[in-house]
Amino acid sequence: MSLTLIVVIVPFLLSFLWNRVIYHRTKQYVDFPQIPPSRIWGHLSTLIHFMKTTKLNSHFDKAFKAVYDCLGSPPVFLLDLRPFSFPICVVCDHEIAEQISISSKLFQYSIPKSPFMRLVGDVTGPRSIILAEDKNWKRLRKLFNPGFSHSHVASLMPCILDKTELFLANLDHYARTGEDFSLDELCTNLTFDIMGAVTMDTDMDAQLGEQNQTQIVRLFRELRSTYNSNKGIWVLLPSYQRRRLARRVDFHIKQHIKAKFEEQQANPAKRSRSILSLSLADQNELTPEVLDETCDQLKTFLFAGHDTTSIMLQWAFYELSRNPRIFGLVRLELDEYFGPESTPIAIRDKILENRDHFLQNMLYTSAVIKETLRLYPPAATSRYSPPNTGFNVRLPSGQDLCLDGVVLYSCQTIIHQTSKVYGDRASEFIPERWLEGSETPIPPSAWRPFERGPRQCIGQDLANIEALVVIASAVRRYTWQKVGLGATKYDESGDPITKENGQYDVQSELYNSTDTGDNSAARGRNENACEDGGSLNHTMLVATLVEIYLIYARKKGCGVL
Ligand code: HEM
Ligand SMILES: *[C@@H]1O[C@H](CO)[C@@H](O)[C@H](O)[C@H]1NC(C)=O
Ligand SMILES: *[C@@H]1O[C@H](CO)[C@@H](O)[C@H](O)[C@H]1NC(C)=O
Ligand SMILES: *[C@@H]1O[C@H](CO)[C@@H](O)[C@H](O)[C@H]1NC(C)=O
């Protein structure tokens, strides 16, 4: 009896399953541009093949770009990574990215975040504004918007300047001793300090050397390292270690919130200007719910605000170091503003004398920052419209495409470099394209490092102000050079070799990785203009805010095209 059952049912089941597989692999998403999928592996082996054509630990955007080129620049393409991950729709066209990020009839606050965001949740906690949706998100955003407004952030300039002074003191030290050093460490410590000061009115002391750093800094560093790409597939698993570390961060942050709350209750007139203080202003009682929620937001700000800004600074420093013409123009602008002064104190006074004037008039320096974020976007977004929602976008061909059930990844690396918008020199660093009177106007939706729409970055003004202050202070005082990966090439007489476009030629390409913390590969050198021989060890990393960890497999790439 049972044998007959097996003989009848098993083939039936197998054939049913096989048909499902065929349907899912070849019919379900047939409308999407894609490389013909393998019935067994989908696009997994394809992706691995393309990842192998790029540097091993480079950012997966590079592999996406290779697939995009191979497919002849489609507006979107599909990567079917089932059963390891959701199918991913890589969005390569700014008009489609825009349709995803704006509010629509179906989604008032734009398409919800993708299930991959769970990974971020391990650090930020489940109540984070980054993960929140609908009314709850709206409430949080309203609560924190005033703290991140341009005018409020500009009023926090003294905090930013204080922390920048420590950064300059560290640079001065290296300029004097002539040692190579890691710009990554210095920038990340700096931005962590700024985040601590601005959001929670506390000194993180990240820039005072390892011994003196606060516990929060150490725990965060450990937390970041749990996301390293060398963990491969394991990074996708719920991590006990990560949650344990996050709980320890909670403890310290909650202590701090309680202390600030009590201070504020005792003396309402002496409220600090931190974003934490603003958000607590209307609370009469610090309930456990408010405490939990506030703690998750502070973790979110620390997490979302320091790595991103640090990466931006590092790439800006690198581009300035290999583009003497651009460096000269930034200096010229600063000369006009600051006069001959270059001491940190003088720079500080001059900036504080008239902040708005400073923020509005560094047009060329702002263009450098904008161009840096174009070529090296440090973050991204991934969204998900659940199956059967009926979310359609209009493709450039006029055809409609339903995007339900696939993870939507706006690939800024591709969007920011399309020749349709940015011309033949799309991959070159040219700040002039952002200045008034440049030939071809750039549609606003084609530049989206902070994303756009209701869920765009709340901290973008803060990031911009930080960048302006730090770059202005450093360019005013030093010149520097990269050593190691991405270093300049020199001719026999020791002069840098310059390419046709005015850029120094480099020995090897500098690339992004998704690693955090392991920076043995890239080193840089800094030279102080006045005292020669100072150096920078300049490490590049890209830890994306909304990292999508693709799965690495050991199998050899096969079956491509
Ligand atoms: C160069 C620096 C930065 C870049 C490139 C950047 C980029 C982004 C992007 C692309 C998003 C959208 C994420 C998504 O749609 O899933 C975002 C959201 C966010 N960013 Fe930033 N960010 C930067 C700096 C900061 C800073 C300094 C803060 C300060 C705390 C911050 C806090 C946030 C928060 C809280 C959100 C979530 C907003 C919401 O969902 O309403 N970011 N950022
Ligand atoms: C920056 O942080 C790293 C790691 O957290 C630490 O080892 C280093 O000493 C810090 N640098 C400075 C100048 O404080
Ligand atoms: C940090 O710690 C070191 C060694 O523990 C100490 O020598 C140094 O003075 C401290 N730096 C600051 C700024 O407190
Ligand atoms: C680094 O990554 C960004 C996107 O994150 C990309 O635009 C850029 O071209 C990459 N740079 C290099 C040198 O690979």
Image: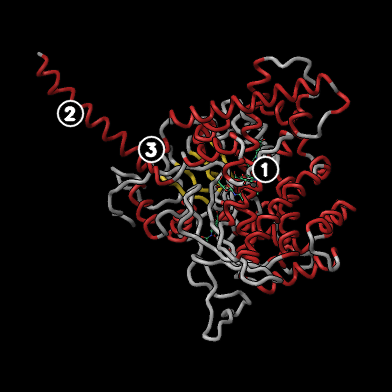
Disc 3 target residue: 234
Q: Residue 165 placed where, x, y %?
A: 74, 52
Kind of residue at disc 2:
Pro
Q: Label 2 belongs to which residue?
A: 11
Q: Can residue 94 be seen?
A: no
Q: Amino acid at mark 1?
A: Asp
Determine the CA span between mark 1 and mark 2. Answer: 63 Å
Tell me the number on the disc at residue 193: 1
What is the distance, in whole Å, between disc 3 and disc 1 at their CAs?
31 Å
- Label whose residue precedes the other's in the sequence (3 or 1): 1
Please tell me whether mark 1 sits on a helix, a strand or a loop: helix
Residue visible at 60% across and 80% down? 500
Compared to residue 395, the image places residue 371 above or below, namely below
Q: Quadrant of the N terminus?
A: top left
The spot of residue 23 in percent (x, y) is: 34, 37
Q: Is residue 268 left or right of residue 366?
A: right
Which residue: 85% across, 22% down? 267
In the rendered view, tell whether residue 105 sits above or below residue 337: above
- Identify which amino acid the numbered label 3 is placed on: Trp
Residue neighbourhood size for the residue with mark 3, other residues' Cα within 10 Å, grouped as few (<14), some (14–19), many (≥20): some
